[in-house]
Amino acid sequence: MAILEETSPERTREYLMGYLRIGELAKLTETNNETLRFYESRGLLNEPRRSESGYRLYTQAEVLRVHFIVRAKRMGFSLKEIDELLSLRVDKESTCGEVKELAEHKLQDIGRKIAELNRMKNALQQITDACCGGEESAVHCTILNALDAE
């Protein structure tokens, strides 16, 4: 592994203790350093311990947490909602029902967005179909005229 090829005794200790530097965490989670720093600044990741040289050091727990964040983002959750999910995850008093309620709310949001996108698509399809697409001056373009009229 490339980590072992580094000659620094400090890095060797970090590796043997199971720590990852930010670039290694980014690579494992298919993110980047800036994203990880941003998650840290938003409180989604705890401030990591630092090496003697000042490098951020992450554990397997952070790898799992970043994977959770990335998967939640792919499902459409905002960072605020992800923070809420992470809080529900660690709160012994929270229930599966609370998590489901948050997920159902997200499903409703996505449904509204899909409906709006379908309205936009249909409106654009209608004015695009009405356009001849010919070589006439754009002054007479039915698409531009339709946008002026609405």
Image (spheres, rainbow, N blue to C red):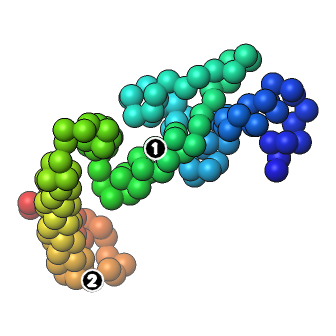
Comparing 125 with 21, the one in front is: 21
Q: Is residue 53 above or below residue 95?
A: above
The amino acid on which the numbered mark 1 sits, given as a three-letter code, is Arg
**Residue 106 appears left or right of 39:** left
Residue at 63% x, 29% y: name it. 57
| Residue denoted by label 2 | 132
Q: How many marks?
A: 2
| Residue denoted by label 1 | 65
Q: Is residue 72 above or below residue 85?
A: below
The amino acid on which the numbered mark 2 sits, given as a three-letter code, is Cys
Residue 27 at x, y percent in the picture: 64, 48
Residue 79 at x, y percent in the picture: 33, 40
Q: Quadrant of the C terminus?
A: bottom left
Looking at this rendering, what residue extends furthest in the left direction?
150
Residue at 46% x, 44% y: name it. 65
Looking at this rendering, what residue extends furthest in the front direction?
92
Disc 1 secondary structure class: helix
Residue 116 at x, y percent in the picture: 15, 63
Q: Nearer the viewer, mark 1 or mark 2?
A: 1
Q: Is residue 11 visible?
A: yes
**Residue 113 appears left or right of 28:** left
Comparing 29 with 114, the one in front is: 29
Q: Earlier in the sequence, mark 1 or mark 2?
A: 1
Residue at 45% x, 33% y: name it. 45
Residue 66 at x, y percent in the picture: 48, 45
Crowding at mark 2 (Cα within 10 Å: few <14, some 14-19, many 20+): few
**Residue 135 appears left or right of 55:** left
Q: In which quadrant of the rendered view does residue 111 lie? A: bottom left
Residue at 91% x, 32% y: name it. 7
